[in-house]
Image (cartoon, rainbow, N blue to C red):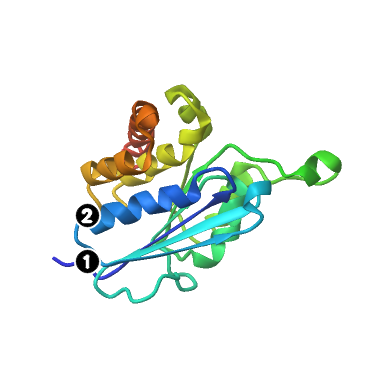
Amino acid sequence: MTLSKFHCYMIGVGGQGVIRGTHILADAALAEGHPVRTAETHGMAQRGGSVSGYLRFGKDVHGPLIPKHGAHIIIALEPSEALRAIQFANQDTYYFISSAPILPLSIYQDRKIKYPNVDSVKQELRKITPHVYSIDALKLAEQAGTEKALNVVMLGFASSSGSIPLKRETIEKSIEKFVPAKALPINKTAFQLGFEQGGKINE
């Protein structure tokens, strides 16, 4: 059966690998024969600003931008960024969130400002969809060998849940294309650690 359309929105802050993560999934979708459209937006990425990647694939996809409330999955590499993506969510959207916050400079400068914790973020998101899941992807990335592999941990987490219509083997081959050879063993471990966590969602 030919896939009609699938929409993935990935969001995080500069330096987390949002765009690379989007490109990995886009490459995997192409490898499986799907028409693919992508787009990206950058805030003040070099200063920790918000960065997002749009991925759409399937026979009925004709443009790169995901319509409002049109995401099948949202992968957020930082909790507060998950809230920024809420405009793309609907009652059937699957949310995958890295629970480790990246505090902006304003929080350090003004202690009166409260930064949302992951539980409050999930509570807010569950007003829209019941499918909200989080893991400490930073801890798993560090366990694999480097915090820079957080995006790959999240790819493993999301893909093993069954919510991405792409084969694990295809995604892993795409990771090999986009990750430097010397970092590949770490990223393979990172993907596996995330995959193991995602497999527990439906248990």
Q: CA distance from mark 2 to mark 1?
A: 14 Å
- Give the answer, above or below, for where 2 lies relative to 146: below
Where on the picture, by quarter, is residue 72?
A: bottom left
Query: What kind of residue is marked 1?
Result: Leu
Left or right? Give the position of 174 relative to 72: left
Left or right? Give the position of 49 relative to 132: right
Q: Which residue is mark 2?
A: 31
User: Residue at horizontal 49%, vertical 72%?
Assistant: 68
Give neighbour class at mark 2: few <14, some 14-19, many 20+ (Cα, 10 Å).
some
User: Residue at horizontal 49%, vertical 49%?
Assistant: 18
Image spot of residue 151 (x, y percent) = 46, 41
Residues at badges 2 and 1 in contact (C-beta under 8 Å)? Answer: no
Please state which of residues 119 and 53 is positioned toward the viewer in this rendering.
53
- Give the answer, above or below, for where 174 lies relative to 136: below
Q: Please report whichever mark, 2 or 1, sits nearer to the chain's N-terminal start.
A: 1
**Can you see residue 111?**
no
Query: What kind of residue is marked 2?
Result: Ala
Please state which of residues 21 and 166 is positioned toward the viewer in this rendering.
21
Q: Nearer the viewer, mark 2 or mark 1?
A: 2
Q: Quadrant of the N terminus?
A: bottom left
Left or right? Give the position of 203 relative to 100: left
**Can you see residue 129?**
yes
Badge 1 element: loop
Image spot of residue 24 (x, y percent) = 35, 49
Q: Which residue is mark 1?
A: 3
Image spot of residue 201 (x, y percent) = 36, 41
Q: Quadrant of the C terminus?
A: top left
Badge 2 element: helix
Give neighbour class at mark 1: few <14, some 14-19, many 20+ (Cα, 10 Å).
few
User: Residue at horizontal 38%, vertical 53%?
Assistant: 23
